[in-house]
Amino acid sequence: MTITHTTLSRLAGLAAVAAGLIFIGVQINHPHLDAASITTTEVVVRGSMKVLMTVLALIGITGMYLRQVKETGVMGLIGYVLFGAGYLVIMCTSFVAAFVLPAIAGTDPSYVSDVIAVSTNGTAAGDVGMVQYAFQLQGIGYLAGGLVFGIALFRARVLARWAAALLAVGSIVTPLLAVLPDAFYRFLAFPNGIAMIGLGFSLWLAARSTRVSVPEPAGVA
């Protein structure tokens, strides 16, 4: 298979679609998290899928940005950096939740409970160290990046504008849902997930329709 710009763009689009589907899927019927449930196979699998989701999302938004660098301008760059940084930190915190917390839940359940509390916008009873700042950083990058990147994509008029608008609006609505109980908190993934699916599919279509112009051979004089 020949690796071309079009091929990479289409793969990035598929990665974004997969990321959106996983992001929504792992939240459906998500069990309540505590020091006991976090060691279960179901929660570990869901956490592992979240790590995979962030990798696919990073590939997807990179493809979106590179597809319209000129059209999005400085706003697009700022949004991409913020959004990408947010997903990078989410990758780290998801890795900790999937592989570190289950390993220490038996020996230090209070710390695990505090980390879970911080991750769901609760209050930790003890000191969780730098993990607390990591969750704050991922929130800023995810929300601010989603808003700025969504606006930039909407203004660029290259990919599906409804999906770009949903990405931006979802970033505004997220802080409102974050104060709701855990059952409603899981719905935070839906606007972003649907937006990623729409943008990814739009990127795949845009790359598919791209045709490379081959210059006609010069005629013989």
Image (tube, grey):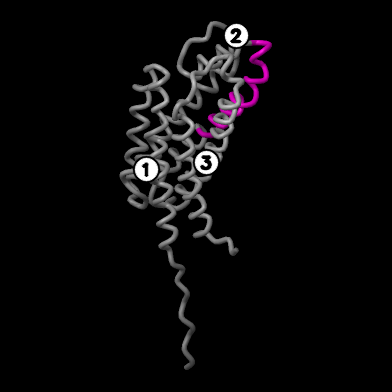
Which image quadrant for residue 175?
top left
Residue picked out by circle 1:
152
Residue at image x 59%, y 24%? 97
Nearest to the eye among marks 2 and 3: give it.
2
Earlier residue among tags 1 and 2: 2
Three-letter amino acid code at the position of disc 1: Ala
Seen at 42% across and 42% down, the residue is 196
Residue 191 seen in the figure: yes
Give the structural element (helix, strand or loop) at label 3. Answer: helix
| Residue 74 position within the rendered picture, expressed as x and y whole percent measured from the top left | 42, 43
Q: Mark 2 = which residue? A: 110
Tell whether position 175 is magenta.
no
Quarter of the N terminus within the rendering: bottom right
Amino acid bearing label 2: Ser
- Give residue 14's position: percent from left, percent from top: 48, 49
Looking at the image, tell me whether mark 2 or mark 3 is earlier in sequence order. 3
Residue 187 has which mark?
Answer: none
Determine whether 186 is above or below 210 in the image.
above
Q: Taken as a whole, is the magenta stretch helix, strand or loop?
A: helix
For mark 3, what is the residue? 58
Question: Per the image, is 88 magenta?
Answer: yes
CB contact under 8 Å: marks 3 and 1? no
Camera-nearest label, 3 or 1: 3
State the separation of the CA atoms marked 3 and 1: 17 Å
Q: Secondary structure at mark 1?
A: helix
Please tell me whether mark 1 or mark 2 is closer to you in this view: 2
Q: Is residue 93 visible?
A: no
